[in-house]
Image (cartoon, helix red, strand yellow):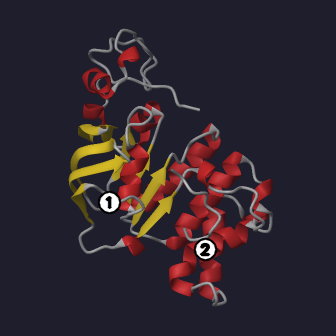
């Protein structure tokens, strides 16, 4: 269980998160949504202690940072670093093996399983610079799977990938949840959130709403979060494809386009 109490985070003199309080239960599958600059990624980095919080607290209960796997945005990683897919994914096992130890047969088996789950076995010895955007994202998931953490934090895991890759990675996420893992993901595509994520946090510096996705993604809440440009239009429902009145239906917003020292410094 993750308990966040009155969390306040600043970037220099600008407030990034204000009085965020929420509880995430073990085994939850939660989407974090909100406009650009709303503090979504900041919330994940606060949990990871990559950002110093101004006030408030984040309680992981009996868990610690070693029980968390963090999947950063692909753009934060140097795609030109001279390393193979196998070498990159192997870093997910660092807490069990350390870098100076050879992989045991068990670790080799787990590595192959992680690559197989994301369909990258045939690309295991390829340089990461040779991967497409979708292949690179699948590689990040494989590293996360090999880490085998209890809490998974995903920062825009479906950015700039095709529908087939998204479906594959959602299958991986659902399997992780079935194993009892807690998954928290920053997502831009609200139609995707409606379809796959039972719980949602709507953030716009403050916590606008939290709870069941169908109760969070309402017109009132989205307008309060800063999606005013959707308040006077009608769009298709993601399930029925029928034109619906926004006052009664959730909105579908179109999608927008560590351990290895190859991740770029972010501001």
Q: Residue at x 75, y 68 (%)?
A: 83
Q: Residue at x 40, y 15 (%)?
A: 229
Check disc 2 and report its element: helix, strand or loop: helix
The image shows residue 110, relative to residue 235, as above or below, that is below
- Residue 163 seen: yes
**Does 238 sit left or right of 231 as displayed?**
right
- Residue 183 seen: no
Total count of labels: 2
The image shows residue 233, relative to residue 15, as above or below, that is above
Q: Residue at x 59, y 32 (%)?
A: 257
Check disc 1 and report its element: helix, strand or loop: loop
Quadrant including the N terminus: bottom left
Q: Residues within 10 Å of mark 1 (few under 14, many from 20)?
A: some
Q: Which mark is residue 224?
A: none
Chain-order first, disc 1 or disc 2: 1
The answer to which quarter of the image holds residue 114 is: bottom right
The answer to which quarter of the image holds residue 213 is: top left
Q: Which mark is residue 27?
A: 1
Q: Residue at x 52, y 31 (%)?
A: 255
Q: How many angstroms separate mark 1 from mark 2 (CA)?
A: 25 Å
The image shows residue 8, relative to residue 257, as above or below, that is below
- How far from the left and from the top, in percent, is residue 156? 51, 45
Residue on which the image places disc 2 = 91
- How far from the left and from the top, in percent, is residue 187? 45, 41
- How far from the left and from the top, in percent, is residue 139? 65, 59
- How far from the left and from the top, in percent, is residue 204? 32, 35
Q: Nearer the viewer, mark 1 or mark 2?
A: 2
């Amino acid at each position: 269980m993750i308990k966040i109490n009155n969390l306040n985070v600043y970037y220099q003199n600008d407030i990034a998160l204000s009085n965020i309080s929420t509880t995430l239960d073990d085994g939850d599958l939660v989407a974090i949504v909100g406009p650009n600059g709303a503090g979504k990624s900041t919330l994940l980095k606060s949990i990871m202690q990559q950002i110093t919080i101004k006030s408030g607290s984040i309680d992981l209960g009996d868990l610690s940072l070693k029980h968390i796997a963090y999947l950063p945005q692909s753009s934060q990683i140097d795609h030109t670093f001279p390393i193979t897919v196998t070498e990159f994914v192997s870093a997910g096992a660092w807490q069990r093996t350390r870098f100076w130890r050879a992989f045991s047969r068990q670790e080799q088996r787990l590595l192959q399983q992680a690559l197989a789950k994301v369909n990258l076995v045939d690309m295991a010895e390829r340089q990461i610079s040779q991967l497409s955007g979708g292949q690179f994202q699948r590689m990040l998931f494989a590293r996360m799977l090999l880490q085998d953490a209890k809490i998974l934090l995903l920062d825009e895991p479906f950015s700039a990938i095709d529908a087939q890759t998204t479906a594959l990675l959602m299958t991986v996420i659902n399997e992780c949840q079935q194993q009892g893992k807690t998954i928290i993901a920053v997502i831009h595509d609200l139609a995707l959130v409606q379809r796959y994520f039972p719980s949602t946090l709507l953030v716009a510096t403050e916590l606008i709403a939290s709870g069941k996705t169908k109760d969070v993604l309402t017109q009132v809440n989205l307008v309060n979060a800063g999606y005013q440009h959707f308040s006077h239009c009608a769009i298709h429902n993601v399930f029925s494809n029928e034109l619906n009145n926004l006052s009664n239906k959730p909105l579908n917003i179109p999608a927008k386009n560590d351990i290895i020292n190859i991740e770029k410094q972010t501001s």
